Image (tube, rainbow, N blue to C red):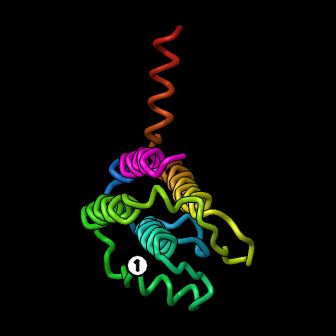
């Protein structure tokens, strides 16, 4: 897969995530499913921080996930977003962090096959690791759709599929 294909897929993932987030009322961003889970705002902060870290470290010439602790990696790349809890600010950051990732990955086509070491010590290609980073975001999008259901909000994709199937019958 080319870097352009990977970027295109990730942009689709991010667009879907943003559409789900746009559906959630601003006054619900402090909602958490249980006391042990993140709030909606915290999930979005985590997605942004993780993407910045995973893309930033993967696109380094000397990728090394073991060069510092996970929290230090997040701090280096993702910064402290704990004070960013307002819907519009988080949406803006979702958009800008995707733009930053595209810039970072843009000239990386010839380096996607370079091997790197994952957190668990296993060797993978940088392309495989970036694909993991994208799937990590999809995981949290799914988490947000559960939150939407708990808030009696129909997820965007569910609504689209209902319309599609209604038109097909």
Q: Is residue 5 magenta?
A: yes
Q: Secondary structure at mark 1?
A: helix
Residue that label 1 marks:
78
Q: Is residue 149 above or below residue 37?
A: above
**What type of secondary structure mainly makes up the magenta span?**
helix
- What percent of the width, then of the height, locates residue 121? 73, 78
Q: Is residue 26 left or right of residue 160?
A: left
Is residue 31 visible in the rendered image? The answer is: yes
Q: Is residue 26 left or right of residue 41?
A: left
Q: Quadrant of residue 69?
A: bottom right
Q: Is residue 110 magenta?
A: no
Q: Residue at x 26, y 62 (%)?
A: 92
- What percent of the width, then of the height, locates residue 72? 50, 90
Q: Residue at x 41, y 68 (%)?
A: 48
- The total of numbered circles placed on residues is 1
Q: Could you say which is closer to the camera, residue 30 or residue 57?
A: 57
- What percent of the width, then of the height, locates residue 137? 52, 58
Q: Residue furthest front?
A: 110
- What percent of the width, then of the height, locates residue 26? 30, 60
- Binning the other alpha carbons within 10 Å of mark 1 as few (below 14), some (14 to 19) or many (20 upward) gives many
Q: Quadrant of residue 65?
A: bottom right
From which residue to which does the magenta span run? Answer: 1-20
Q: Is residue 108 above or below residue 11?
A: below
Q: Could you say which is closer to the camera, residue 68 or residue 39?
A: 68
Q: Residue at x 32, y 62 (%)?
A: 103
Q: Residue furthest top?
A: 169
Q: Is residue 105 above or below residue 75?
A: above
Q: Residue at x 33, y 55 (%)?
A: 25
Q: Could you say which is closer to the camera, residue 60 or residue 14?
A: 60
Is residue 26 visible in the rendered image? The answer is: no
């Amino acid at each position: 897969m080319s870097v352009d294909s990977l970027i295109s897929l990730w942009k689709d993932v991010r667009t879907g995530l943003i559409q789900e987030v746009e559906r959630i009322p601003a006054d619900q961003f402090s909602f958490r499913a249980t006391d042990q889970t993140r709030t909606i705002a915290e999930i979005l902060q985590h997605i942004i921080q993780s993407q910045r870290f995973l893309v930033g470290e993967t696109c380094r010439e000397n990728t090394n996930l073991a060069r510092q602790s996970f929290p230090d990696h997040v701090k280096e790349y993702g910064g402290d977003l704990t004070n960013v809890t307002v819907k519009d600010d988080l949406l803006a950051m979702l958009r800008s962090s995707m733009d930053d990732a595209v810039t970072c990955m843009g000239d990386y086509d010839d380096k996607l096959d370079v091997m790197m070491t994952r957190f668990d010590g296993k060797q993978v290609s940088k392309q495989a690791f970036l694909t993991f980073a994208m799937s990590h975001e999809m995981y949290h999008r799914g988490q947000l759709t559960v939150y939407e259901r708990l808030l009696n909000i129909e997820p965007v994709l569910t609504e689209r599929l209902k319309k599609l199937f209604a038109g097909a019958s």
